[in-house]
Image (cartoon, rainbow, N blue to C red):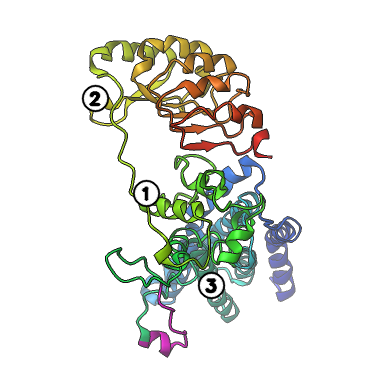
Amino acid sequence: MSSGARMTFRLRAALPGLLAVLALIALARFRPPDGHEHAALAQFFGRFHPTLVHLPIAFLLLVVLLEVAGGIRRWSRVGEAAGFVLALATLSAFVAATLGWLLAWSGGYNGPQVTLHLWSGVWLCLACVLCCSVRRRPPASPGATYALALAATVALMVWTSHLGGQLTHGENYLTEYLPARARAWIGLAPLPAKARVRPASGSPRATDSFYAAAVAPIFENHCVTCHDANKQKGKLRLDTYEWIMRGGEDGAVIKPGDPKGSDLYQRINLPPDDDDFMPSDGKPALKADDIRMIEHWIATGASATAPVGDFVLPAAEPPPPPVAPDFRPLTGRIESLEAALGVHLVPRSQVPTDGLILRTVSSPARCDDAALVRLEPVADLIVDAELARTKVTDAGLKTLARFHNLRSLDLSHTAITSANLGLLASLPHLERLNLTGTAVDAAGLAKLRPALHLKHLYYFGTPAAH
């Protein structure tokens, strides 16, 4: 085959890859991450990106190993597999880049580092296509042009992976614990000393800012990996006081003097499996002491300058005493109801008087108003009812008002309205109520004011939130 024919053949072989790169460029250019959440299905597929992104990394490193081994006479046959593995690396790079765009675009991310990581993934796909097009087929040697292209592709892959690691773990993830001498040798500036919350017995000075000494480190350790200058999920930054008070795409997240009305405080108190829970993306929940610190800071005005000496942190509330009867004598009835209704009644703890949790997540469509009526014989045992996305309506609230030992009730994304909401105010132990995604309005929330024990009320995405 002449050199011109070979060139034509290579261009034709590379054409599908080049068209795929153009499609990725179009997505990144005309549908960039804008800080708004989009289709739920896109988010579902996009969340596979952190898992599948390791495939092109592994394949490219394996290509290098196979090419090096193939240059050794006794292992020359090994190099024949390099072309196939390179094709797998290219295909997996396109899959990972596409899922990465889906994750960034649909998940509410934006920021310069998100954009840089996205484009570096696109260029990595192009580099893989070019490697495939310039590599000579066996038994010819791969060629010097290919060797340079492969080295550049691996370097670009390392850079892209580094950007992804920074987005996930923070800007200084790789260098945070690098010894000072090593930092100086490679030209990195010394890291500033981190603010730490010192024990009450000692050392914060009375003139130290409570925000800087106690609150900012919580945001730094738990929040800024998703909410800083480089990555702003929901257009929210939590890396400085000014940005915190500015809020995100849905407005202010802190209402000074009103913790329960502050979006940020509500979200850190949600169950970890809730879509609106913070910190998101599977990160661990804040400790109870950290939540109390933020609550007290907001309740006292959310000041940036008020000194530590002005703050007296209230004592932690003791856990509520057990209020449910012993469930063991009713084990047979409980098992029958689970089988008949398709729900789960799970012990809250190993203590028989801590009550049961009603769980419906495995088959929410089977739980409706009639199912709640059938659960009334064990109503006093249920302290936590997880009814999100079930078919419970306003009629079901009349039944739930007879579940006298309820402490937590999740009615998010159900068909309830404000009509019978006031019935829940009579529940003597209800502390947590989730109404996210329902049709409840401000008049309905007003009916809950007599609920003296209610501490956490969530109503994202309802008429009452607007």
Q: Image point 69% across, 40% down: which residue?
A: 466
Residue 34 picture location, percent across and down? 69, 56
For label 3, the SS is helix
Which amino acid type is shown beneath numbered disc 1?
Ala
Rendered-image quadrant of the N terminus: bottom right
Q: Image point 59% across, 71% down: which residue?
A: 135
Residue 182 magenta: yes
Residue 190 at least partly seen? yes
Which amino acid type is shown beneath numbered disc 2?
Pro
**Residue beneath disc 1:** 288
For label 2, the SS is helix
Compare residues 335 and 145 and report the one nearer the observer.
335
**Residue beneath disc 3:** 159
Structural crowding at the residue carrying mark 1, measured as other residues with C-alpha within 10 Å and reported as few (<14), some (14–19) or many (≥20): few
Q: Nearer the viewer, mark 2 or mark 3?
A: 2
**Residue beneath disc 2:** 352
For label 1, the SS is helix
